[in-house]
Image: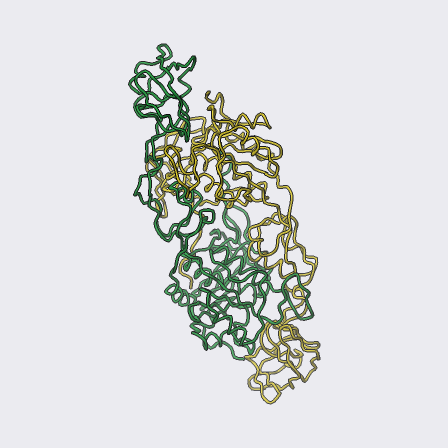
Chain colours: A yellow, B green
Amino acid sequence: MKGFSERALVSDVLNWLRQRTVSTGSEEVVAAELLGRILEDAVVAGIDVPSFDRSAMDGYAVQAESTDGASLYNPLSFLITGQALPGTPHSGSVDANTAVRIMTGAPVPDGATCVVPAEHATESDGQVEITQAVPIGRHIGKRGEDVVQGQRLLNAGRQLRPQDIALIGSLGLDRATVVRRPRVRLLITGDELVIPGQTKAAGQIFESNSLMLAGLVQRDGGELENPLPCEPVSDQRVVIAEMLTRPGADIILVSGGSSVGTEDHAPTLVSELGQLVFHGVAMRPSSPSGIGQVGDALVFLLPGNPVSCLCAYDIFAGEAIMRLGGRPAGWPYGRIQGVLDERIVSDIGRLDYCRVSITDSADPSISPLAISGASILSSTTRADGFVLVPADLEGYAAGTRVEAWRYDTPNNHPGELK
Amino acid sequence: MKGFSERALVSDVLNWLRQRTVSTGSEEVVAAELLGRILEDAVVAGIDVPSFDRSAMDGYAVQAESTDGASLYNPLSFLITGQALPGTPHSGSVDANTAVRIMTGAPVPDGATCVVPAEHATESDGQVEITQAVPIGRHIGKRGEDVVQGQRLLNAGRQLRPQDIALIGSLGLDRATVVRRPRVRLLITGDELVIPGQTKAAGQIFESNSLMLAGLVQRDGGELENPLPCEPVSDQRVVIAEMLTRPGADIILVSGGSSVGTEDHAPTLVSELGQLVFHGVAMRPSSPSGIGQVGDALVFLLPGNPVSCLCAYDIFAGEAIMRLGGRPAGWPYGRIQGVLDERIVSDIGRLDYCRVSITDSADPSISPLAISGASILSSTTRADGFVLVPADLEGYAAGTRVEAWRYDTPNNHPGELK
């Protein structure tokens, strides 16, 4: 049992990670499952949309010149020769004296050059009286007005929004090629751990880090390999080694046993089976974190203490998952400014992740939580967010204006719409 | 075919909706599926967490008084009588002359009142030499230090974060009671519509609104009733009536056929089978929107034009789905300020939803898109977001500082961490 001899700087760990996390691989995904996925290839239109001239109004398709001079005082009369409905074109054509009744979205019949809206027309006995002159092209959506064949519509790397998926569908495509989601394996170690819902003996605790990590991985676009609930793995070298070397994972998140105690097999196994690049990071909590590689998998040794686990995930593993998945790295947390109402004490040389409460006001007041041990999971649920103290500061004095991160995803209410 | 005689104010529609959208019903959901769900009941701790005193360090459990005076120059020696591991308590007790080797997370044996960290101890021949005096309670996590039995941990209405789900798990619970997601039925009408991936004839277009709506419903926490791809429904009264009256939906989103043309069956059917409360809203696009009720279902008549469909969904239907699901209503859009580089023309008396491009700068420049017809789906994919012009303004002059909404969900990069 030895302490860490040296701790890596957070920025050095991130620089190393960023060089090793480039999205690899792609997959075809059906339209129904594309929300939030990242396009691997640009979407280029294979067809015009619409692929025909269509009416933009309910009304009458006529030759625009024939409406010259029409007004309420000078209604002009046309013979109705048919009807064009969406999906049911009119097969005939329109001449100077005829009109075709047409609905929004229906193909404009041959010969017609405008649509007179129903508001300016009165139909009776197979005739329609038109009371407004309408210029050429009016109320007609031209072929290709939305999308022209060959047009590049969505760039590679785009995170797909609901309207993007609709656009892909409007081209007749029922799927798209997107970046494959990184496959994430959870390796939860600890002989004291019991799955929630089961019976707990003396000295045991309910395993909960897997639930937090599963939610974080889902949030950040990773694909969890493990079925849930996640079976904890016993603190045995052979079991952990198998989980580290089994193919199929892009990322392995190891929770617990990351430190330098006799029961901490994971760090030695990572260095024996692959490369333990960093072990011990200059941050609090999470200083016993480690990062390495076994085969093709990036391995994150996350401390078993839940606050450390969350913090090390958010600072290192989450970014790696987002980058491997082709996403812009970042936190789905609200970024706010406010005034500290109590000081935060830190040490030069390490990054501090300090849970805070934040008042709901225009200029929020930010208070560090009193109970803040790395083992206190409830501190991350009582907290509204956190403040980061960089390594070159000893902390912040009370009254300092600081930046804080809110755990809740911003959802902005537009206020009273009128 | 008649125009709208009168258009409702957006604010009147919203006021009506807000009185009718209270979350109803709850369901038990397993922990693996709780992310983002809304708690129906507060979570109250049924147990202490941890349920025993545990070591916060790897080291040696001793009686604190016995370490008085220990230092590098005065190491004190203790007999090691056993070992406590996580999940494997030491059954004996500690006295003034003995120590128990202990790992982080292991139960502290009877008699021991502190843990001496491994860094300040040297073990050999069944003895440990301790070189630091350690006060009572140091490096011990007390029973209930995280959670005390009976404590209220999460309030009803909370949207569950990854750490919240872990906290629930740490209590031994494998599920929670959350607000039931509103069930949403899509009713996509239009004889011209073809499912993407199928073959399209002349005058037909690929159906895409269902893909957009499915994504929006998923985003806002609704549960889609329809399997995807969604089969369009023909413009026949009997078919639409069946879809409007079939039980099981909390919300019915009707796309297309919402206006006042002869093929627009939905509005008349809603008023015959239930109540068509609003038809025609003072906004652009989406003015042919309608809102009503059939049986227990709120019915939204969304125009078939894709931009109108998106806009009417976001302003009315999305809020209803969020409220029925117990969520705080709001848009997952970034709210920014910037300067308009061209004027936006609107009319007094209506709300305008104007798609814009937004530069990526600290003080962004905002440009209305030139092509902005309600039928141009690609305008919502080219746009970065939108500006709302309220009914009491005629628009905004170029150079005005305005608020805009970014379609992309904010994901904030913390920048260089150090």
Q: Position of residue B119 (x, y in %)?
A: 42, 19
Task: Kindly give the residue lying farthest to the left in the view shown.
Answer: B65
Query: Which quarter of the image is occupied by the C terminus of chain A?
Result: bottom left
Q: Answer left or right for A222 relative to B101.
A: right
Residue at 33% across, 34% down: B145
Please state which of residues A320 and B83 is positioned toward the viewer in this rendering. Answer: B83
Is residue B237 depicted above or below A46 in this figure?
A: below
From this viewpoint, which residue is outermost toward the top?
B73
In this view, the residue in front, B44 or A344, is: B44
Q: Quadrant of residue B61?
A: top left
**Dividing the picture into quarters, in which one does residue B204 lie?**
bottom right
B3 shown above or below A319: below
When asked about the image quadrant of residue B292, the answer is bottom left
Residue A368 appears in the picture as rendered = no
x and y percentages locating residue B36 in the rendered image = 45, 50
- Residue B245, image x, y percentages: 47, 71
Q: Nearer the viewer, residue A79 or A370?
A: A370
Q: Is residue B322 above or below residue A215?
A: below
- Answer yes or no: is residue B56 visible: yes
Q: Is residue B131 left or right of residue A257?
A: left
From the top left corner, tell me how far across and down residue A112 is, in percent: 68, 77
